[in-house]
Amino acid sequence: MLEHPVVVIGAGPQGLAAAAHLTERGQEILVLERGDRAGAAVSEWGHVRLFSAWPELVDTASGRLLKATGWMAPERGYPTGAEWVDGYLAPLAEALGERVRYGVTVTGVARQGRDKVVDGGRRSQPFVVHTQSATGEEGRIPASAVIDASGTWGLPNPAGADGYPAVGEAASAPRVSYRIPGDVSEYAGAHVVVVGGGHSATHAVLRLSELARRAPGTRVTWLLRRGSAANVFGGGSGDELPERAALGSRVQKVVENGLVDVITGFRVAEFRQQDERLAVVAEDGREVAGVAQVFALTGFRPDTGMLRELRVDLDVSLEAVAGIAAEIDPNIHSCGSVSATGARQLAQPEQGLFIVGAKSYGRAPTFLALTGFEQVRSVAAHLVGDHEAAARNELVLPDTGVCGGSGGFDAGEGGCCATPAVLEIGARPVAVG
């Protein structure tokens, strides 16, 4: 076993799964969570129902650890985020006990006594994890290895189409949200805009369309950067996750029924104040006026600041782990499902460091919980020297039935066969009202 504990950053689904696998193999671990509970980020979208069923949301080692406590695995159904936390993540963290610490923010990770520049003796030194408690107390924790499962939830992409906030976006903060709405009743009779083409945006559109159906005068406008709306409707009968397929079918119907106005090729450049409303302005000058609220659901990006003193290999465009970038890049032809990834693909120049979970995918909108569970199973095996298990692929991911990718980003472009969008939180909306 390793001299120092393996430090896992983040007590979300993948962080806790990594801890379970390492605990099962007898390795000392320590999980550091910034929030005050397990699955703190998941709790923030607790009103959203996942399109993966319960059996696809429970890691194998975690399930074994929980069963020893008398826990019974849910066998069917599609939980909300809150149900996932209460029924699985919180009990798992409780089973791990004092190995999980809450209210601890990781501010940096380095090699002991060596910054990023120093070569000499680098690999022989343990990692040092710099922390800050909720009360501001600073600390240093030695670690034999570090698994960064901190996710991307804390850093949503802006509405601005070029990756930076649009002009006026910051000043419009009270009327711009980057989260899937829960209770939308306050927008009855108002004009609401959704920006984004992924499953989170689709979910928001469905919630708001139900409001438009019930409350006359409610207007919902959906702004898509792509030149076509075809890909946002999903893979239909070709999708092996039926709830994900149903999501696309439902949103297609509300668009066809006129409950939602879709504007394609709209790349947000500016937010302009209009009395108590906003005007959303595109780069080509088109304008959507009289907007009461904007939901900018354009994906997430990783915060790599805590790793700046380590030698990390990330893809220059996706900010994903370089070893898996080609497999998940939405600009590359890749029909059907992405492959499982393990320790070999996730390895970093800094030996003993692994970025897993949604953060390993960077800006790619393709992450599935099953993928993360397979990642941490492989990484845990590698860290304890079981290289045969680390190299083994124990996962087959479901197909999406989607072909489209970056093709069609501009009107008139041909489609390509692209990496499927399988982000966990784009799911069937909970009924409102």
Image (spheres, helix red, strand yellow):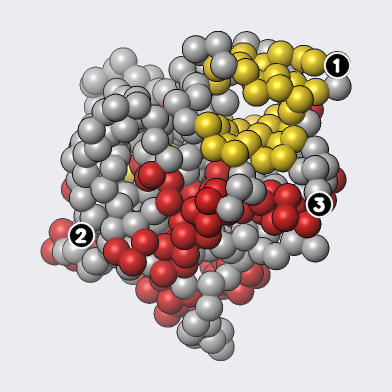
Give the quadrant of the N terminus: bottom left
x, y percent for residue 191? 75, 35
Q: Secondary structure at mark 1?
A: loop
At label 1, the amino acid type is Asp
User: Measured along the vertical axis of the image, is residue 168 above or below residue 359?
Assistant: above
At label 2, the amino acid type is Ala
x, y percent for residue 206? 61, 53
| Distance between mark 3 and mark 1 Cα atoms | 24 Å
Q: Please give left or right for residue 408 compared with residue 96 in the image.
A: left
116 or 120: nearer the viewer: 116
Q: Secondary structure at mark 3?
A: loop
Task: Return the residue at label 1.
Answer: 275
Q: Earlier in the sequence, mark 3 or mark 1?
A: 3
Q: Residues within 10 Å of mark 3 (few under 14, many from 20)?
A: some
The residue lying at 50 percent from left, 24 percent from top is: 266
Task: Return the residue at label 2.
Answer: 390
Instruction: Using the rendered image of the protein, determine whether residue 138 is visible from the camera's viewpoint.
Output: yes
Task: Return the residue at label 3.
Answer: 215
244 or 423: nearer the viewer: 244
Which quarter of the figure has residue 336?
Answer: bottom left
x, y percent for residue 47? 68, 59
The residue lying at 26 percent from left, 48 percent from top is: 403
Instruction: Using the rendered image of the protein, determine whether residue 19 is visible from the camera's viewpoint.
Output: no
Q: Please give left or right for residue 404 compared with residue 357 in the image.
A: left
Q: Please give left or right for residue 72 compared with residue 123 in the image.
A: right
The residue lying at 64 percent from left, 48 percent from top is: 259
At label 3, the amino acid type is Ala
The residue lying at 80 percent from left, 43 percent from top is: 217
59 or 171: nearer the viewer: 171
